[in-house]
Amino acid sequence: MSRGTQITLIVILVGLFALFYQGLWGDPRHIPTVLIGTKAPTFIGPDVETGRPISLDQFRGKVVVLNFWASWCYECRVEHEHILRLHREFQHDPNFVMLGVNYQDELSDAQRYLQRFGSSFPHVRDVKGTIAIDYGVYGVPETFVIDQHGIIRYKHVGPIVGPTYDDLKQHMLMPLLTGTEPSTL
Amino acid sequence: MKWISIFCCLSLLMGPCPSSWAGVVDESELDIQTREIAKTLRCTVCQTENIWESGAPLAQQMRNVIRERLAQGQTPEEIRAYFLSRYGDYILMQPPKRGINWLIWLGPFLLLFFGSLLLLREVIRWTRATPPAPPPPTLDERARQRLDRELHSES
C-alpha cells in the first residue's frame, strides 16, 4: 500500500471517528425545528380550569408564549416557578400573552397540579393531541414564542431555567415587545 | 359422554379465535392506508419505532390524525408532507433521497466498492511482487539410480 493510500485511509478513519464521537456526546434533544419562521398553527380548546374555549386567534397581534406541559412531567415542575416568574415580569405589557397547553393528561390531574403549584395565566387542554402534533412537539416541556404577526420565532425543548430563561427574556421577549428584531437564539 | 366433554372444552378454547380473526379480516381500506402511512413515520418519543408499532400515546394520536386526514380525502403524500412540515426529515423512517442524505443511502455501497478496489489492487500487487517458486532441483546420476533401485525393489 502506497504512502498516499495509507494517509487517505487514516484521514477517512479519523473523519468517521470524529462523526461517531460527535454523535455520541451531542445533545440528543437537539433536533433542528422546521417551524421557526412559519405561521403558528391556530387552535381552539377548553380551558383546563374553567372549561371555556380558548383560541389562539383571540390573541392575534400579541406576543404569545406557548408552554406545553403535563402534570406527570417532572421537568415541568422544575420549570413551573420560572414560568410563573416570566409571566409576572411581562404580564403588565398589553402585548404579552402567556398560554399553557396541557398535553396528554387527565383533566383532574392537570387541575390538581395547577392548584398545587399555582396558575396565573390560562391553560388550554389538548384533548386529542392535535395541538402538540401541529406544533411538532416531541415531549414536554416545550416552549414556543409567537410574534405579533403570528410567526413562530422561538422553540425550546426542555425546562425554561437558568441561562435559557435569561436568553428567552432578554434576547427574544424584550426585543419583540419593544418592536426590535430579536437576536437568533 | 367423554367425547362430548372434550368437544365442549375445545369449543370453549377455540371460542376467542374467530373474533380475533374477524378483526383482521374486517380491516377496512382506511385501516390499511393508515397502517401503510404510519409505518413510514417515526415515533418521536420512542425514536427507534414507527408510529404503527409504537404503543406511546403520541403515536396513537398520530395514527388518529392520519386516519382523520384520510377520511377527509387527503392523499398519503399530503399526510406525509403535513408531518414533514411539523417535524422535519426526522419524522421519516427513511431519510429522503436528496442533498447530504445521499451519503447515507450511497455511503455503504461506495465504501464496499472502493474497499473492494483497494483489496483487488493490493492482491494484484502482492501476487506480482511474489517471485515464482524455484524449479525443483535436478537429480544427479547417483540419486537417480538409487531411486530406480528402490522403486524396482518395491514392485
Image: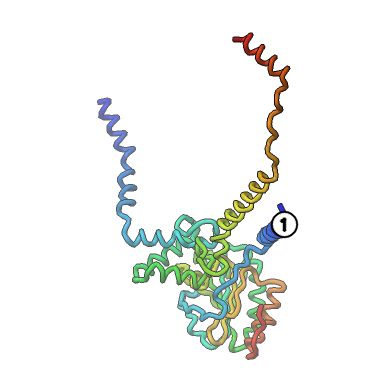
Residue at screen point 66% across, 64% down: A27
The image shows residue B34 at horizontal and vertical percentages of 39, 62
Q: Is residue A108 at least partly visible in the picture?
A: no
Task: Name the residue at the right extreme.
Answer: A3
Task: Name the residue at the front extreme.
Answer: B141
Residue at screen point 41% across, 69% down: B77
Task: Identify the residue position indicated by label 1 in the image.
Answer: A10
Q: Would residue A67 be found to the left or right of residue B55 on screen?
A: right
Local crowd at mark 1 within 10 Å, few (<14), some, or many (≥20)? few
In the displayed structure, would residue B105 be above or below residue A1?
A: below
Quadrant of res B146 = top right
User: Which quarter of the image is occupied by the N terminus of chain B?
Assistant: top left
Q: Which of B81/B111 is in front?
A: B111
| Structure colour scheme | rainbow
Tell me the kind of residue under disc 1. Ile
Quadrant of res A35 = bottom right
Give the mark count: 1
The image shows residue B68 at horizontal and vertical percentages of 38, 68
Q: Secondary structure at mark 1?
A: helix
Residue at screen point 33% across, 43% down: B17
Residue at screen point 59% across, 10% down: B155
In the displayed structure, would residue B111 be above or below residue A61?
A: above
Q: Is residue A23 at least partly visible in the picture?
A: yes
Q: What is the chain identity of the residue bearing mark 1?
A: A
The image shows residue A10 at horizontal and vertical percentages of 72, 57
Task: Name the residue at the bottom extreme.
Answer: A179
The image shows residue A2 at horizontal and vertical percentages of 72, 54
Q: Would residue A90 be found to the left or right of residue B24 on screen?
A: right
